[in-house]
Image: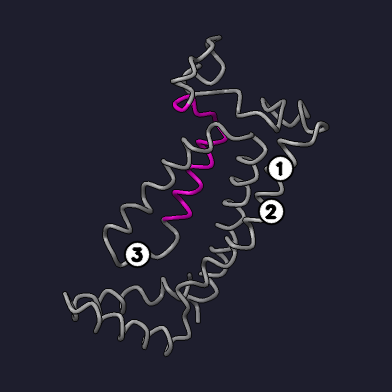
Amino acid sequence: MAKMKKLAPEMQRLKEQYGDDRAGMQKEMMALYKKEKANPIAGCLPILLQIPVFFALYKVLFVTIEMRHAPFIGWVHDLSAPDPLGALTLFGFVDWNVPGILQILNVGIWPILMGISMYVQFKLNPAPVDKMQAKIFGLLPIIFTFILGGFAAGLVIYWTTNNVLSMAQQYIIQRKIMKS
């Protein structure tokens, strides 16, 4: 991804040069990737490796009896239940049983932190050349915040921690590549 970020100005130049000739632009982009030894799909490999870990953690949190009501730090007293401090209960300040239909809006602190970390991670990556794709990627942190709001807190904590560690790793790698 750091190489792709470094190539972003050249990719933008190709897009402006070729305009509506998508076939010509794709041909030149492939030649650029080959010349610079950059692979746009390489950023997906870490995600593919994480999917089995995420699924295994999901199963452990929902199937294992020992994980039920397992205490954790702070306000999370059950890693297998959703974050207990939701936005509609003012993060625990109002004692209110949120109706079922509004549960999707009752996003906790950890899902919000996860959404913020996804957004920051998105901004660290090179912007997609296609404007529609960039808009969709910009909306993904918001969508995932609401989707994962009802997931087990342990999964959301894992995802947030993973995002933060990935950002640190990405920062180090980008600094290293930009220097060369």
What is the x, y in percent for residue 114?
53, 42
| Residue depicted at x 50% and y 16% | 89
Numbered range of the magenta stretch = 104-122
Number of the label disc, if any, that sits on residue 89? none
The residues tagged by marks 3 and 1 sit, at their Cα atoms, a distance apart of 34 Å
Number of residues whose C-alpha sits closer than 10 Å to that of mark 3, classed few (under 14), some (14–19) or many (20 or more): some
Label 2 element class: helix
Looking at this view, is 150 or 89 the one in front? 150
Q: Amino acid type of disc 1? A: Lys
Label 3 element class: loop
Identify the residue at the far top of this view: 95
The kind of secondary structure the magenta stretch mainly shows is: helix
| Upstream in sequence: badge 2 or badge 1 | 2
| Upstream in sequence: badge 3 or badge 1 | 1
Number of residues whose C-alpha sits closer than 10 Å to that of mark 2, classed few (under 14), some (14–19) or many (20 or more): few
The residue wearing badge 1 is 59
Q: Amino acid type of disc 3? A: Pro
Looking at this view, is 88 or 165 the one in front? 88
Number of the label disc, if any, that sits on residue 53? 2
| Residue depicted at x 51% and y 76% | 177
| Upstream in sequence: badge 3 or badge 2 | 2
The residue wearing badge 3 is 128
The residues tagged by marks 3 and 2 sit, at their Cα atoms, a distance apart of 28 Å
What is the x, y in percent for residue 74?
69, 28
